[in-house]
Every structure is written in structure tokens, then in C-alpha cells.
Image (cartoon, grey):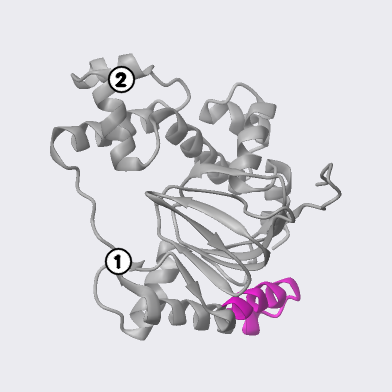
Amino acid sequence: MGTRDGHREWARHWRYAALPGLDLLRAHYVRHTFPRHAHDGYVIAAVTGGIEEIGLPGHALRAGPGSVVLINPEVPHSARAGAPEGWAYSTLYPSRELIAEVAAEIGTPRGTPGFTADMVADPQASRTITEVHRAAEAGNALAADTMLRGVVARMLTRHAGPLPARPPRGAGGADAAAARALLEERMADPPSLEQLAAELGTSPFALLRAFRQRYGMPPHTWLTDARVRRARGLLDAGTPPAEAAVAVGFTDQPHLNRHFTRIVGVPPGAYRRGRAGG
């Protein structure tokens, strides 16, 4: 990807077959901005150049070289360049199962582990994350797996505790959870906010407020993110992008391409190649 100001953007989002339960993203972004979204699993990102600005619930971070950004599953966040030169990073996206496996091996407290810090200054860990990428790209499974488990264990040992459960609070929380379930069920043909509220016996404004409070974004933003997540699963299973677009409720493949690229960081075609080539 090129940019008008002469800075070169590039990204590789892929999966290495020898490291199950892990997605890898290495990129340099300048103009690209990630809208508010969330992940099924965890994010462990080492910024290697420039500044990344991350928007989290209630606050923003500025991460530079030597820092590691830690984000738990389902935490809404956005990202953009915090400096004219953009930012470069190496990111690990470990699944819940992989984190739980490492946590069990090192004897962390019971319960689902969660990071208690969202950014730490740890140049050694940052270098190790980059080395995981290099080893995977070189096809060195032994080194990649060893360093991956080592850096995950380091982060869990130093910066983790039980992930707090988030039960629905009162009627508003229950309505938000019910609305999310309905949107998941009818993703390809979702109801309007007014229809959704009427089905749940509440008002549109009350539902909007409850949904934002529980999920960190309004229903339409959450739905776009959910559609992209489901499209990723379909692409992983070999579904052509045009079919995946319609299946999740996008009007056509260009509609999927636009939102997919913004949220995932690479277009659907590059994403598919990254799964096949691991």
C-alpha cells in the first residue's frame, strides 16, 4: 500500500501452521486507522517504530518502540498513527485456548487469565515478539514456538490476573445482551434500532445507552465488527470473499473489502493467502 506523503504502508496478516491458535500481523501503517473493534482472543503487540495511538474504554495510549500493548478478549479499541511517520509493529493474536494452556503450564491462578496492564515498557519482550515473527517467517518452528511460549509466560507472570466476569447489570445489561444475541442471529438482515428496542420492550435511546455501556460501541458499530469476524471464519474455511460478503450481510464484495481492510488491517484476498501460505 502506498501513501501520498511518500511513506510506504505494508502489512502481512497470516497464520503459521506450526503455531496453532495464533495469528500474526507485522505492519507499518501511516494513514490507516482501525475503527473501534474487538477480538475473540488476546492482543500482544510490540511497537517497533513510530508511535501507535490506541483508544481504549475511558482512555488512550501512546505506544512507542520498546513498549508492549496488551489487550484482553472483547475489549473494544481503535488504533491510528500518533506521529507523522506512522507506526510499525509486530503483533501476536493468541487464542483463549493458547493463553489458557500457557497459564496452566506456569501455574497462574485459576480462572480465565486476563492482562492487568494495557501497556508495559519491556524492550526485551518487544524484541522477543519480533523474533517470534522472524522465526515463523524463516520456517523455524522450534524457535518460534519456544519464544512464543516464553514471551506469553513472561506477560502472564508479570501482568495478569483472573479475567473479571461481566454479568449483565440490571434490565439495561440484560437488554444489551439480548440485543447482541438478536443481531448475531439476524446478522444478514438485522432489525433497525427501533425494531430491536420494540422487540425487547424498551426504548431506542435506553437500548443504545445500555449497549454502549456494556460493549463499548453502539449496535451498528458492533454489528460491522461482528460481520467481519464471521467473514474471517468463513474465509478460513475456504469460502470465496463474494459469498462470505453476502452471507454476513454486506451488500457486495467491495463493501466487505472496505470494512474488512479497516478492521483486520489487510484486504480479504491477502488475508486468505496468509492462511493458505502458513
Determine which residue is flagged by label 2.
196
Q: Is residue 207 left or right of residue 121?
A: left
Question: Is residue 89 or residue 99 the one in the foreground?
Answer: 89
> Residue 199, position in %: x, y?
24, 18
The reply to whether the magenta stretch includes residue 137 is yes
Determine which residue is flagged by label 1.
112
Tell me the kind of residue under disc 2. Leu
Residue at (39%, 33%) from the top-left corner? 184
The reply to whether the magenta stretch includes residue 241 is no
Residue at (41%, 63%) from the top-left corner? 96
Question: Is residue 173 or residue 270 the one in the foreground?
Answer: 173
The magenta-colored residue range is: 126-145
Question: Is residue 120 or residue 22 the one in the foreground?
Answer: 120
Q: Main secondary structure of the magenta part?
A: helix
> Residue 10, position in %: x, y?
77, 54
Residue at (70%, 55%) from the top-left corner? 86
Q: Is residue 77 above or below residue 66?
A: above
Q: Is residue 157 left or right of residue 213?
A: right
Q: Which residue is the extreme one toward the right?
A: 6
Q: Is residue 102 above or below residue 171?
A: below
Question: Is residue 120 or residue 270 the one in the foreground?
Answer: 120
